[in-house]
Amino acid sequence: DIRMTQSPSSLPASVGDRVTITCRASQSITYYLNWYQQKPGRAPKLLIYSASSLQGGVPSRFSGTGSGTDFTLTISSLQPEDFATYYCQQSYSAPKTFGQGTKVEIK
Amino acid sequence: QVQLQQSGPGLVKPSQTLSLTCAISGDSVSSNNAVWNWIRQSPSRGLEWLGRTYYRSQWYNDYAVSVKGRITINPDTSKNQFSLQLNSVTPEDTAVYYCARDVDSLGQDYWGQGTPVTVSS
């Protein structure tokens, strides 16, 4: 199985901050990397697919980069509704493994 | 607009079978480019992909090694839904279970509402 490692696990931040989360795959997954946002009691929401493509309806302050094994999710200016947990997931091969999550919390 | 509606019991006894159903609207379980997944989430295991079913001129299934031998995912074309059966459950199978769609490996874009399942006597 491909192992996905996110960092940091927790990220204290303030409204307006630029926030970056990283995700590393244990082997190359080319660009088959997705990012999700999850709020308590809700299903994950797809933000970015194929490493850098913004899912419809997702604000442009979210962006993704990377290929191979190293990827980043950036929120350019954190908004109050962005405090949540973020997960990466590889869709290169089954099982479609997830990272352990990064909780963006109020500083 | 695709919607996935989950149903099934929230409490299962140890050694018994967990059964959940995901009813699809706005798409077809027999779609030639969609894949239908089951995913679970628990504090100890995080988000864990369990398996999928999809149709590409014939039906295919893939399962996670962690549950292989205990899991079955079946499509039901007459009701446009798919199901999850997990046999011989233990308390470690306690989790929130989600169904989800993905298209061409571009991420799970639609999710069910989630079903909390507790394994306890």
Image (spheres, coloured by chain):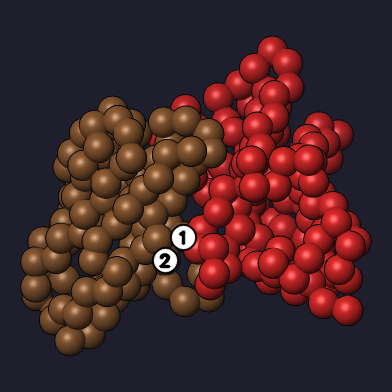
Chain colours: A brown, B red
Position of B110 with respect to B19 (left or right) is left
At label 2, the amino acid type is Gln
Percent across and percent down for residue A73 are 21, 53
Percent across and percent down for residue B29 are 70, 33
Picture quadrant where residue A22 is located: bottom left
Residue tagged 2: A38
Q: Residue at x 27, y 46 (%)?
A: A24
Residue tagged 1: A44
How many residues crowd mark 2 within 10 Å: few (<14), some (14–19), many (20+)? some
* Secondary-structure class at tag 1: loop
* Secondary-structure class at tag 2: strand
Percent across and percent down for residue B6 are 72, 58
Mark 1 to mark 2 CA distance (whole Å) = 4 Å
Q: Are marks 1 and 2 in contact (CB under 8 Å)?
A: yes
Q: Residue at x 39, y 54 (%)?
A: A99
At label 1, the amino acid type is Pro
Looking at the image, the residue that sits furthest to the bottom is A107
